[in-house]
Image (cartoon, rainbow, N blue to C red):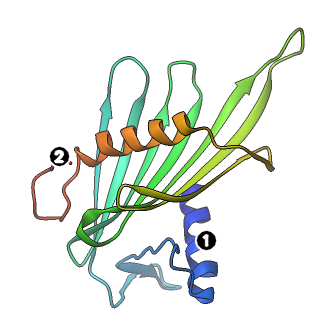
């Protein structure tokens, strides 16, 4: 679902010239016969998984275009069974440019029955500076709390340390 959202966001914002567009590339496209068709990019994807053994298990895919890291897509499962999909987009020198967090939560208040809540958090960055952010909960705009951005940024650094900035380099710490 996040991949489809990121792809559609990339297509719609690229057409408008938005500098925050989520660029994505893929080295193969399916023809009607199902055979891969080469396209103009050199894209490599690397998969991995990790767990901090307390709060979540995570599977991720890092995508590289022309040997440079452009996106890490992550699927997390929390101990309570809730899920989160995150995408971390990178620009020049593997600097983060955008983070998207989509999650499904179970919420209850007072004596009411638990309900499923869908939340999406978008953060746009230039290096270490947050340019803008937005949050939607069940399609209603909400205020982004500073700790939410701090938590996403901390996790981005954790996942970034597990992948290489290029598809031929070892993992790096930032």
Left or right relative to 12: residue 26: left
User: CA–CA distance between discs 1 and 2?
Assistant: 29 Å
Residue 6: give x, y in percent of width and height: 56, 65
Sooner in the amino-acid sequence: mark 1 or mark 2: 1
Question: Residue 145's quadrant in the figure?
Answer: top right
Q: Nearer the viewer, residue 32 or 155?
A: 155
Quarter holding the N terminus is bottom right
Element assignment for label 1: helix
Q: Nearer the viewer, residue 15 or 4?
A: 15
Q: Which residue is at a point 43% across and 47% down the rendered structure image?
A: 74
User: To which residue does mark 2 refer?
Assistant: 173
Most distant residue in the top direction: 111
Closer to viewer: mark 1 or mark 2: 2
- Can you tell which mark lies on residue 134? none
Residue 18: give x, y in percent of width and height: 57, 81
User: To which residue does mark 1 refer?
Assistant: 9
């Amino acid at each position: 679902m996040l991949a489809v959202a990121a792809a559609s966001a990339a297509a719609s914002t690229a057409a408008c010239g938005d500098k925050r567009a989520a660029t994505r590339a893929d080295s193969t496209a399916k023809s009607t016969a199902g055979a891969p068709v080469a396209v103009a990019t050199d894209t490599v994807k690397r998969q991995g998984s990790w767990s901090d053994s307390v709060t979540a298990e995570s599977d991720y895919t890092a995508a590289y275009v022309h040997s440079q890291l452009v996106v890490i897509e992550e699927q997390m499962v929390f101990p309570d069974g809730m899920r989160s999909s995150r995408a971390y987009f990178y620009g020049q020198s593997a600097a983060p440019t955008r983070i998207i967090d989509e999650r499904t939560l179970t919420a209850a208040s007072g004596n009411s029955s638990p309900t499923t809540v869908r939340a999406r958090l978008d953060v746009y960055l230039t290096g270490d500076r947050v340019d803008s952010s937005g949050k939607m909960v069940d399609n209603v705009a909400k205020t982004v709390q500073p700790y939410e951005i701090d938590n996403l940024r901390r996790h981005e650094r954790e996942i970034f340390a597990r992948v290489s900035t290029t598809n031929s380099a070892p993992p790096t710490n930032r």
